[in-house]
Amino acid sequence: MPDQAALLHTLNEQIVACRRCPRLVEYRERVAKEKRRAFREHAYWGKPVPGFGDSKAKLFILGLAPAAHGGNRTGRVFTGDRSGDFLFAALYAAGFANQPTSVNREDGLRLKNAYIAAAARCAPPDNKPLPSELLNCRPYLLRELEILQPKAVLALGKIAWDAYLTILKEQGTISSRAAFAFAHGAEANLPNGVRLFGVYHPSQQNTQTGRVTPAMYAKVLRRIQKFLSS
């Protein structure tokens, strides 16, 4: 039987080849061709961005979607943009990463007991995937969760929080999402044995305005570490 790493590798090949959403295919490829001036010498990825991390992870981190000039450029989730700078610094400080920076796929970054993916795998216009696009991506998320069987899920923002709860509702694990309100620092024990944690998304808008601070992330990540080691 294939191990988790092999199963994830096969899944990630399927994700990278996906062309289910015409709007996203057009946008991600156009951005990769036009490029941002600061990155005009870069070869953009321009494809769906697969998950990344430890194949035996007990923490599953769920984001929204790749950034047009971040993941869509580098080919790795939360890599090459300000959101990633903030997130990986926090993960490093909490012991989930071997370094605090995430620049490109060859930078030596390794995650420890953590795996990161996004609810939408392609960069969407205005960072807003459509409900139909999230639905098209859901089987990939479902498969990752089946392979990894995480003990904890950290949702980066309300859309990610809802995406995970929607899967549980469809599986009949919960009857309604309404019982689980999203907030920064929210925590929910779920009937499937998973503990769901929520934080505000590490978007540049949130981090630069002080709505999200390193201390706020550190506090939640400490609670997750304590839970995973219990």
Image (spheres, helix red, strand yellow):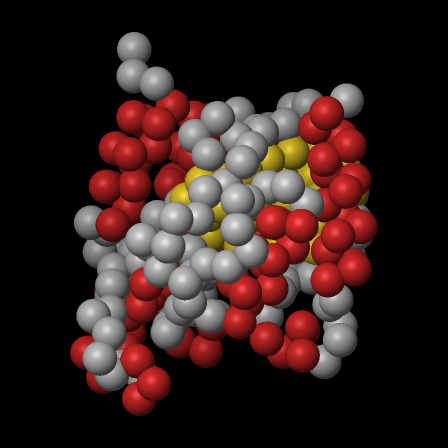
Horizontal arrangement in the rendering, residue 29 relative to residue 170 (left or right):
left
Q: Quadrant of residue 209?
A: bottom right
x, y (%) of residue 75?
31, 58
Horizontal arrangement in the rendering, residue 50 relative to residue 169 (left or right):
left
At horizontal 55% and vertical 33% (from top left) the residue drawn is: 113
Q: Residue furthest top?
A: 1
Q: Residue furthest bottom?
A: 37
> Foreground: 18 or 36?
36
Horizontal arrangement in the rendering, residue 53 relative to residue 45 (left or right):
right
Total number of numbered discs in the rendering: 0
Q: Does the image show residue 88?
A: yes
Q: Does the image show residue 166?
A: no
Measured along the vertical axis of the image, is residue 218 above or below residue 22? above
Measured along the vertical axis of the image, is residue 159 above or below residue 34? above
At horizontal 67% and vertical 79% (from top left) the residue drawn is: 208
Measured along the vertical axis of the image, is residue 52 above or below residue 217? above
Q: Quadrant of residue 172?
A: top right
> Which quadrant is the C terminus positioned in?
top right
> Which quadrant is the N terminus positioned in?
top left
At horizontal 67% and vertical 73% (from top left) the residue drawn is: 206
x, y (%) of residue 213?
75, 66
x, y (%) of residue 56?
48, 26
> Foreground: 139 or 144?
144
